[in-house]
Amino acid sequence: MSSCCRQRTPELESAYRRILDLVEDASSIAISGHTSPDGDALGSVLGLGLALSARYPHKEVTFLLADRAPVPRIYQFMEGADRFVPAADAEGDPDLFISVDCPVTERLADSAQVLARARTVACFDHHPAREEFADATVRCVDAAATAVLIEDFLNWAGIELTGEIATCLLCGLVTDTGRFQYQNADPAAFACAARLVDAGAEPSRISLEVYQSQRLGYLKLESLVMSRIHTVADGKVAYSYAYASDLTGYGVTSDECDGLVDVVRAVRGVEVCLFVKETECCHRVRGNLRSKCDLDVSGVAAAFGGGGHVAAAGFTYEGSIVETLNDALPMLCELVGADAEGIHVEL
């Protein structure tokens, strides 16, 4: 379905019909995004969940968090954010489980247990998948965000979008395109954004809540990360890092750190970049990768069990920050066509 985000093919409409049939046949529906949810995962769950709740008030619709962590602060403004339930606490066997923005069940974390108990499973996603796990799937890898697929599905189904629903979906689109700065900001993304704003979405509120309401502690951490930026491969690869003690010292939670990779990405002349941070778990590091050109960083993430898109990907590494950098940087150097020999970091 390579063209599905630009036009509705017969195959896409057939997939929409299968999912709508599953929705209409279900009395209870559970919807979940991936672990460590970003704006697209959360916005897609909320946009779809709120729309289905309004269309089918007699159905039980549950919004699941794949982890026990709370909704990140910058996304708590979205309508319905207070309705999320940790999947580990979810009871019962839903008639339908809908996975959004997640290509593999492993990335569903605790929500995978709810999926296993569900009678039927549906999926909306824009990531490549090793294999399909749902009874009905809408997968479009050239869609800018899963929120784009949700918006088109609701439009096809004749389900009305309120301003609140449209704002949730626009938040997913805005964050996954880096405020329409990434390479995935194609004409279909802008057209979708226009429809969402026409439906009542508030882009100014999204900008204020997500990008212009940072706490002072976060801004100080951002300054520290900026001071640690280094480049290799003749300036084509940049990296920086944050220790768990840095986050604790500035009172910053891990979920607030998603935007720090864009500080590293901003360096002039850089083609690909890496930001790594220690998690609260001992010897576990979260890595975020970005590309400013047509180079595909998802392969580097996949080498460490992660994944993502050509221009944005992530992974979790069992080890220290130094070990992570020394394993990942040579791969990034090779990606930009530079000699990886002799790349060694000592912090």
Image (cartoon, rainbow, N blue to C red):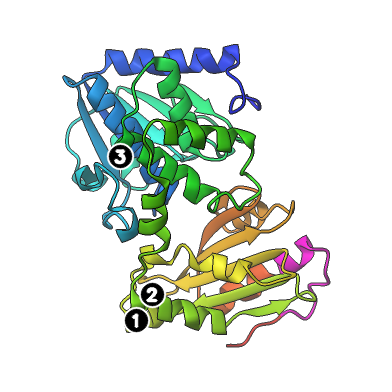
**Which residue is under mark 1?**
250
**Which residue is under mark 3?**
113
Q: Is residue 114 left or right of residue 338?
A: left
Asked if the magenta segment contains residue 342, the reply would be yes
Relative image position of residue 24 (x, y in whole percent): 29, 14
Asked if the magenta segment contains residue 152, the reply would be no
Give me the C-alpha separation between circle 1 and circle 2: 7 Å
Q: Considering only order in the chain, which callout, 2 or 1, is on the residue closer to the N terminus? A: 2
Relative image position of residue 197 (x, y in whole percent): 43, 36
**Residue 125 appears anywhere in the view:** no
Q: Residue at x 28, y 36 (%)?
A: 114
| Magenta residue span | 330-343
**Quadrant that contains the N terminus:** top right
Give me the C-alpha separation between circle 1 and circle 3: 35 Å
Q: Mark 1 falls on what kind of element?
A: helix
- Residue at the bottom extreme, as displayed: 347
User: Would you call the spot at circle 3 few (<14 residues within 10 Å), some (14-19), or many (20 or more)?
Assistant: some
Up-down: is 108 above or below 76?
Answer: above
Give me the C-alpha separation between circle 3 and circle 2: 34 Å
Up-down: is 111 above or below 61?
Answer: below
Relative image position of residue 117 (x, y in whole percent): 28, 30
Question: Which quadrant holds residue 80?
Answer: top left
Q: Amino acid at mark 2?
A: Tyr
Q: Number of numbered discs present?
A: 3
Q: Residue at x 31, y 52 (%)?
A: 67
> Which marked residue is nearer to the observer: mark 3 or mark 2?
2
State yes or no: discs 3 and 2 in contact (Cβ < 8 Å). no
